[in-house]
Image (cartoon, helix red, strand yellow):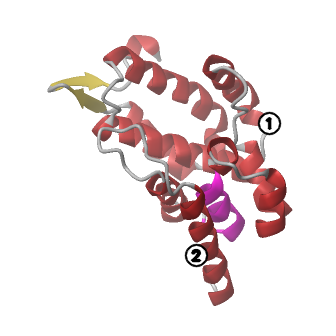
Amino acid sequence: MRATQLSQFISTAAFAADKHKDQRRKDASSTPYINHSLGVADILSQTGHDDLPTLQAALLHDTLEDTDTTLAELEITFGSQVAHIVAECSDNKTQSKQVRKQIQIDKARTVSIKAKQVKLADKLYNLRDLQTNSPPDWDIRRIKEYFIWAGKVTRQIEDASPAITELLAQVYAGTFEKDGVVYNCVDIDLV
């Protein structure tokens, strides 16, 4: 990454950190929300997806749906390409959670390759988090349902990143612990 790109990346991270400054993850540790955005960008970088617009979109991928950020603000600040990727990764929060989840499944194949890569990294981060630091109010059924739903999304876009897809396969084949009991992330009969 050249100096100007590094500067743009850091400015994007600062913007995302400011937008998410009062937010916490739902995990048991109430992790600062920006850790998620940074983690998604890190997954992309570590798997060879290191072009600036993709990494910027990873940092910003939840700003439209979870903060007061507007699409116009993203376009003005980061350009139309980054704003478009973020929009493709965003849910419409006026719809019910069930509807939003189905829309993610339905539209997964139709988004740009960069949005698919961000989406794969986002799901990988969330699934790893569920394996080690699940929300205290999530029971076993809800955790397993998330794994199954994430699989329905990621299977459709796995060609966008073989490296992330391999990491996802390891997670799906893995286990998680809840209240001292170990469970399969995805049961064979549910795949």
Q: From the viewer's perspective, is 190 left or right of 69? A: left
In front of the other: 8 or 33: 33
In the image, which is nearer the foreground, mark 2 or mark 1?
A: 2
In this view of the protein, can residue 171 be seen by the observer? yes
Which secondary structure class fits the magenta region best?
Answer: helix
Where residue 106 appears, as percent x and y from the top left, is 73, 24
Q: Quadrant of residue 159?
A: top right
Where residue 24 appears, as percent x and y from the top left, is 44, 46
Q: SS for tag 2?
A: helix
From the image, tell me which residue sits under label 2: 10
Q: From the viewer's perspective, is 178 left or right of 152? A: left
> What's the magenta region?
50-61
In front of the other: 134 or 19: 19
Which residue sits at x=32%, y=33%? 174
Q: SS for tag 1?
A: helix
The residue most toward the bottom is: 3
Quadrant containing the N terminus in the rendered view: bottom right
Which three-letter amino acid code belongs to the residue tagged 1? Thr
Q: How many marks?
A: 2
Precedes in sequence: disc 2 or disc 1: 2
Where residue 114 appears, as percent x and y from the top left, is 71, 53
Q: From the viewer's perspective, is 120 left or right of 166? A: right
Which residue sits at x=61%, y=40%? 158
Query: Is residue 127 a member of the stretch shown in magenta?
Result: no
The Cα–Cα distance between marks 2 and 1, rounded to whole angstroms, is 30 Å
Which three-letter amino acid code belongs to the residue tagged 2? Ile
From the image, tell me which residue sits under label 1: 110
Q: From the viewer's perspective, is 66 left or right of 79? A: left
